[in-house]
Image (cartoon, grey):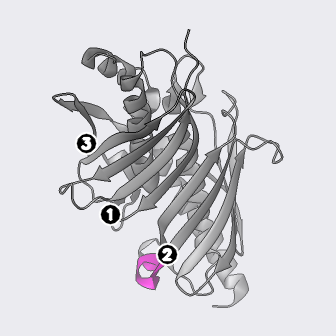
Amino acid sequence: MPNSDFIQKLWELGPTLAEHTPHGKKLGIKFVAVDKGRATMSLPYNPELIGDPDTRVLHGGAVTTLLDQACGLAAIAGFSEPSACATLNLSIDYMRAATPGETIIAQAHCYKATKHVAFLRAVAHDGDETDPIATAQATFMATGLRNVESMSW
Amino acid sequence: MVSHENIEKAIARIPYAQTLGVKHLFIGDELTLIMPYIESNIGNPMLPALHGGSISGLMEIAAIVQLMKEQDGGKLPKPIGINVDYLRKGNPKDTYARAIIFKQGSRVANVRVRAWQEDYEKPIAAMHGHYLMAKKG
């Protein structure tokens, strides 16, 4: 697949993954951008995702889900051949609480992809990349083209 | 040790736990969380499979609730870091999670969580995390 066609397909796939899956829709995840090996998604503040009712801070699990989703798209965008993928491992460090009311942005980068495995780093922040809420390191496994087609390629 | 009734109240107060549909079950004193199948936890409707984030969310709630159970209530512990291994596809079925506190320090706790569906011996995911405990008093 020529590079420009691949990128074009990724721009079609991004909103499908982020916003049109039942869980993405429930949380309110939004697709922002995608490029070769890179993806950005956002999560507007949603009171249904609060983890601590006293502080109204979002639950870590919501941040985890956003990072997982952004890494998933960046992994697909990182493989040389179009392929669906599955999370093998996701490691997250929480630096600080997400500010109540603020949209969280997750930027993921596939820094290495072998034939079957993609290695990613991601950061979640609420506007200032140098003041992260959380950082992630993830590995994803390519699961083949058949599943990609099932994701409406 | 927090009472069973207070665990129920604590889970009911966490909006994110309600969004995932998380409930709890005690067998004696052992706490298991259940995430009954609901469509809104699906991440891939074509397979279909639960979203890895909903499984991870269940395990993160299990870790926090287990830590609350072992301490005398109060403020919620804060996550410092988690590491999740996804072992099998999450089928559109009820999912269970059970947490074990490997080490409880005065400020930091190390917790391990297993998530499974029909067979405890075939976990779909495993997590370990460390948490900052709220200061007492």
Callout 2, which amino acid? Met
Chain name for mark 1: B
Q: Mark 1 points at which residue?
A: B48
Whether A75 is drawn above or below B38: the answer is: below
Q: Nearer the viewer, mark 3 or mark 2?
A: 2
Farthest-out residue, bottom: A1
In the image, residue A4 lies at what x, y percent?
72, 83
Q: Mark 2 points at which residue?
A: A141
Chain name for mark 2: A
Secondary structure at numbered mark 1: loop
In the image, residue B57 lies at what x, y percent?
44, 43
Same chain, labels 3 and 2: no
Instruction: Determine the residue positioned at 72% across, 75% down.
Output: A36
Q: Give the range drawn in magenta.
A: A142-149
In 3D space, how far apart are the residues under numbered discs 1 and 3 (Cα atoms)?
A: 16 Å
Which of the pair A32/B73 is nearer the observer? B73
Q: Would residue A21 be visible to someone looking at this image?
A: no
Q: Mark 3 points at which residue?
A: B36
> Does A113 appear in magenta?
no
Secondary structure at numbered mark 2: strand
Instruction: Determine the residue positioned at 26% across, 19% down.
Output: B4
Quarter of the view holding residue B51 = bottom left
> Does A143 appear in magenta?
yes
